[in-house]
Image (tube, helix red, strand yellow):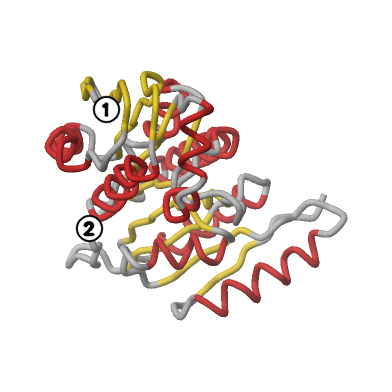
Amino acid sequence: MIVESYEDVIVLSGALRSNFWETIHTAISLLLKRHPTGVIIDCSGLTECTAEGAETFRDAMDFIERNRARTIVAAVPHAVMEVLRSVPEVRSQLPVVGSVEEARRSLDMLAQGETKGRKKHLTSRTDRRFLVCLSGEESDEQLLMVVQELAQTTSAEAVLIYPILVPRDLPLQSPLLEQEEIAAKALEAGRRSLQNAEIKTEIRLERGRDVASAIHGALEEYMVSQVLVALPCNSGQSHDQALKLVSSVLAKVQQSVLFVRGPIR
């Protein structure tokens, strides 16, 4: 086995016949100091992998997750992928993409706007903090207007989140580039809108199996006074979608919740 590293990438080459975690541990630790959003493991040079060797990925994922970062595995040869799929804990958790470039696009998405790993308390200068859940639909405009109205009479901060909804048959940290690109645009537009209104704003992607889970995940890191959620306003099944969303969010969120829906189109 040969281990190399550059930028945010660990490159594995040769035959992975045993658990190589102790060897790559130091390299990954150093990469996380420079790239705290996560690490890419480039497997394009692997010629062989055994079930014992696959345990390397499990240990790497566990370590990186404890550091509140992401692992993405890229360019896995077909024969190696077959072995990884045979190891239950690896198969169910390992996010895999076709290339290092795809992995980096996902890792870097909004990295400059996200501040993970710290519990955020209301400061003495801030009377209220809102957690604002965008949808990427027209309701977002109405939602941001409501946030601005609520912030007019008090010192307020906003945490804008966009839920990346990951299908249950994929690991939670799987890159979903189409969703992530839509999220990036919606979050950046929201940040500009609130900052123009002089509201201090943070943005972040939040991954979950559904919107309620994504909101709940964000609330584990942020103490907020109120949660605001955009409801779907498209025609057709928007009423049923809205009722389902309201029910699921209220079942998981104990804070005050305000739902906002724009005009039905």
Q: Position of residue 136 (x, y in %)?
A: 61, 45
Q: Is residue 105 left or right of residue 238?
A: left
Q: Which mark is residue 10?
A: 1
Camera-nearest residue between 104 and 90: 90
Is 232 placed above or below 75 here? below
Q: Quadrant of residue 156?
A: bottom left
- Secondary element at image label 2: loop
Q: Residue at x 84, y 59 (%)?
A: 237
Disc 1 marks a residue whose amino acid type is: Ile
Mark toward the viewer: 2 or 1: 1
Q: Is residue 196 left or right of residue 1?
A: right
- Tell me the crowding category of disc 2: few under 14, some 14 to 19, or many 20 or more residues within 10 angstroms, Cα based: few
Camera-nearest residue between 223 and 93: 93
- Secondary element at image label 1: strand
Q: Which residue is mark 2?
A: 118
Q: In 3D space, how far apart are the residues under numbered discs 2 and 1 (Cα atoms)? A: 26 Å
Is 2 placed above or below 232 here? above
Camera-nearest residue between 78 and 133: 78
Q: Position of residue 264 (x, y in %)?
A: 80, 55
Q: Is residue 246 left or right of residue 234?
A: left
Residue ranking furthest to the right: 236
Q: Position of residue 111 (x, y in %)?
A: 34, 36
Disc 2 marks a residue whose amino acid type is: Arg
Q: Quadrant of the N terminus?
A: top left
